[in-house]
Image: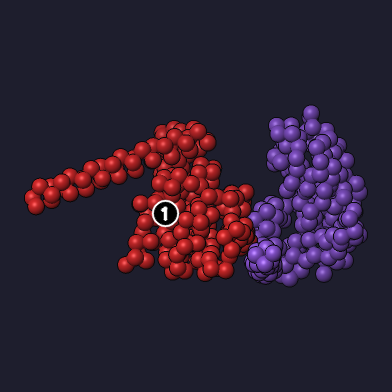
Chain colours: A purple, B red
């Protein structure tokens, strides 16, 4: 009995201390990890949809809550502003639409003065390679540049992919979702 | 002197994975380039040195019946520390090594050294043992990764080194290529040590004949 108690106490102590150490390290690295993720995953997309800025859109990013997800947890939107002489003239943020095989995440860049797209870049998707996955190609994303976001975009405005209608629709839906987000939170994005 | 011996035995006598033939899973999987091999090796070396020292310090407290569980917890703690640090400061490498970083926990080398060495030796000796074996592992992985990258992709640390008409042997970057490379290196190392043993034997015989 005494031996069992010793086994339990020692093992519990080791596990407990390990837990504390890990919680501490997790806390310590949370900031750098978030920055590394944004820097490595989002930065290329942000660079491809914005141009002509003289600030660091990654460093100047702003985030604000935009409601809750289906589990009731708060969701926040991260916006990357492009500034010239300290004034925001365009913003980039992620929006998503449903494609053939699941959500398509699209980084959308919008000029906030004339409401025109400065570019889009697909950041996450699970479309079919060779078919829907062609939404990654510049031949598909390039015609989005300069589209007017004052009204809903339809696939007649852009070069739809033959054989990948649902993927095309997903990207268009993501851009239209971005349009609604922009209309709703414009004041928070541009300040 | 003996500390130095504990440290250096990892570079030849017990050189993993060739002598210990442990830890083959990450060896075969991540050595597709010199950079990956070195990153994986150094991560393992850090875990090995730290866990060896801590386990050695705790060896009188840990009851032998639960020692394996206690060792695993200690190793796992250091592995998660490495994983988080790598994710924060070496994100590109973290993405490439992926699942193999958490899998250091079940890599046989840290547990094997804990059981075979740290649980019956002092803290300093265990640290030297862990660091030596770990660096030996890093060197092996680096060498294997270098060979596979140079011949399989014609590059070294991502920079082209082979002449322009060189046709890279893509086979070497696949899993079977890893086995072939590992086998050839193991054969080379065995040949060298067989020759060494023979020379030592002859020297001993010569000394005996003279005396």
Residue A64, quarter of picture:
bottom right
| Residue drawn at 87 percent across, 57 percent down | A182
Whether residue B57 is situated above or below residue B183 in the rendered picture: below
Residue B7 can be seen in this image: yes
Residue A133, quarter of picture:
top right
Side (left or right) of B144 relative to B4: right
Residue B168 can be seen in this image: no
Secondary element type, mark 1: helix
Q: Residues within 10 Å of mark 1 (few under 14, many from 20)?
A: many
Pick whichever, A101 or A93, lies toward us: A101
Pick whichever, A22 or A77, lies toward us: A22
* The furthest residue to the top: A163
| Residue drawn at 85 percent across, 38 percent down | A169
Instruction: State the image coordinates of residue A3 (x, y, percent, origin top left).
Output: 65, 65
Please give the chain letter of the residue carrying mark 1.
B
Side (left or right) of A38 relative to A154: left
Pick whichever, B53 or B44, lies toward us: B53
| Residue drawn at 40 percent across, 50 percent down | B15
- Which residue is labeled 1 in the image? B136
Whether residue A185 is situated above or below residue A145 in the rendered picture: below
Side (left or right) of A53 relative to B115: right
Instruction: State the image coordinates of residue A69 (x, y, percent, origin top left).
Output: 88, 55
Instruction: State the image coordinates of residue B181 (x, y, percent, origin top left).
Output: 43, 38
């Amino acid at each position: 009995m005494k031996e069992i108690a010793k086994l339990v106490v020692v093992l519990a102590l080791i596990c407990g201390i390990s837990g504390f150490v890990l919680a501490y390290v997790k806390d310590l690295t949370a900031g750098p990890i978030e920055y590394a993720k944004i820097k490595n995953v989002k930065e290329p997309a942000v660079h491809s949809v914005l141009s002509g800025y003289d600030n660091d859109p990654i460093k100047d990013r702003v985030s604000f809550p935009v409601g809750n997800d289906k589990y009731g947890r708060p969701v926040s939107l991260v916006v990357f502003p492009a500034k010239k002489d300290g004034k925001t003239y365009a913003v980039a943020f992620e929006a998503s639409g449903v494609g053939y095989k699941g959500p398509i995440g699209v980084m959308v860049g919008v000029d906030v003065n004339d409401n025109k797209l400065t570019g889009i870049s697909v950041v996450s998707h699970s479309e079919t390679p060779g078919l829907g996955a062609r939404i990654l190609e510049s031949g598909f994303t390039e015609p989005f540049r300069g589209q007017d976001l004052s009204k809903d975009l339809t696939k007649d405005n852009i070069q739809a992919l033959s054989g990948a209608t649902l993927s095309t629709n997903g990207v268009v839906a993501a851009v239209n979702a971005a349009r609604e987000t922009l209309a709703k939170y414009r004041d928070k994005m541009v300040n | 002197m003996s500390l130095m011996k504990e440290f250096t035995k990892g570079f030849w006598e017990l050189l993993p994975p060739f002598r210990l033939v442990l830890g083959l899973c990450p060896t075969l999987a991540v050595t597709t380039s010199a950079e990956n091999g070195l990153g994986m090796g150094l991560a393992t070396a850090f875990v090995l040195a730290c866990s060896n020292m801590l386990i050695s310090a705790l060896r009188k407290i840990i009851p032998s019946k639960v020692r394996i569980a206690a060792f695993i917890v200690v190793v796992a703690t250091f592995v998660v520390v490495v994983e988080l640090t790598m994710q924060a400061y070496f994100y590109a490498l973290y993405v490439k090594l992926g699942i193999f970083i958490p899998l250091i926990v079940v890599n046989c080398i840290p547990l094997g050294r804990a059981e075979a060495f740290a649980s019956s030796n002092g803290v300093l000796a265990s640290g030297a043992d862990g660091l030596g074996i770990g660096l030996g592992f890093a060197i092996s992985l680096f060498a294997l990764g270098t060979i596979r990258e140079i011949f399989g992709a014609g590059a070294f640390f991502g920079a082209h080194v082979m002449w322009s008409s060189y046709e890279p042997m893509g086979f070497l970057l696949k899993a079977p290529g890893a086995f072939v490379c590992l086998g050839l290196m193991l054969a080379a190392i065995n040949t060298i040590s067989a020759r060494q043993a023979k020379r030592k034997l002859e020297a001993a015989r010569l000394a005996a004949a003279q005396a």
